Image (cartoon, rainbow, N blue to C red):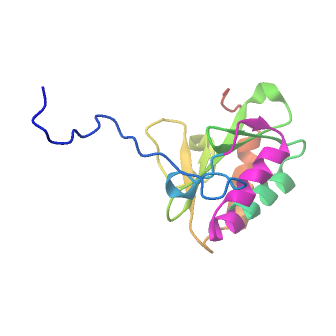
Amino acid sequence: MTDGKAQKPTKNTKQATRVDPDKPVLLSGGNPQIAKGYGDAPVQAYIAAAPGWKRDVTRRLDAIIEKTVPGLRKAVKWNSPLYGAADEGMGWFLGIHLFNSYVKVSFFRGASLNPIPPGTSKQKEVRYYDVYEDKLDEAQFADWVRQASQQPGEKM
């Protein structure tokens, strides 16, 4: 029975819309919606779709990770680039995700790094490094990447 008033939807029906069918949808925070895939190509598609200064930051992060880790494995899962050491049995050691005002780097075993990255998590082992426009400490990031790539990562 209704009282003639329009009923509000019970679920959030708002969805990302594609303005240009040749460009990926940008989700909240400007995070590109990229199909799951393994290898460098999906990661480069993610980077190319990142908006504004976040594209430059993710490109720099990707280059540092590539330079630091021989035999690097890459993938995009859950609309986030993941990085793993050459040995697939080691899992993934790092992920990247875009937010409105920063790029979040997740070190999946970050509590074991020295020094420990500053961002805490609800998960005991995970630590975050939030990168703001023009605020990337490349030397410290490369050192964390080197350390993280030598530890067992997450199986995802």
Q: Quadrant of residue 60?
A: bottom right
Q: Quadrant of the N terminus?
A: top left
> From what the image shows, is residue 101 above or below residue 97?
below
> From what the image shows, is residue 133 above or below residue 121?
below
Q: Main secondary structure of the magenta part?
A: helix
Check the image and name the residue furthest to the right.
Answer: 71
Pick whichever, 111 or 99, lies toward us.
Answer: 99
Q: Quadrant of residue 81?
A: top right
Number of numbered discs visible in the structure rendering: 0
Check the image and name the residue furthest to the left.
Answer: 3
Q: Position of residue 19 (x, y in %)?
A: 60, 58
Q: Position of residue 120 (x, y in %)?
A: 47, 48
Q: Position of residue 48 (x, y in %)?
A: 74, 59
> From what the image shows, is residue 23 above or below residue 71?
below
Q: Residue at x 84, y 40 (%)?
A: 39
Q: Residue at x 64, y 44 (%)?
A: 80
User: Magenta span has 103?
Assistant: no
Q: Quadrant of the C terminus?
A: top right
Residue 39 located left or right of residue 91: right
Pick whichever, 24 or 94, lies toward us.
Answer: 24
Check the image and name the residue furthest to the front.
Answer: 4
In the image, the segment drawn in magenta is 34-57
Pick whichever, 47 or 107, lies toward us.
Answer: 47
User: Magenta span has 54?
Assistant: yes
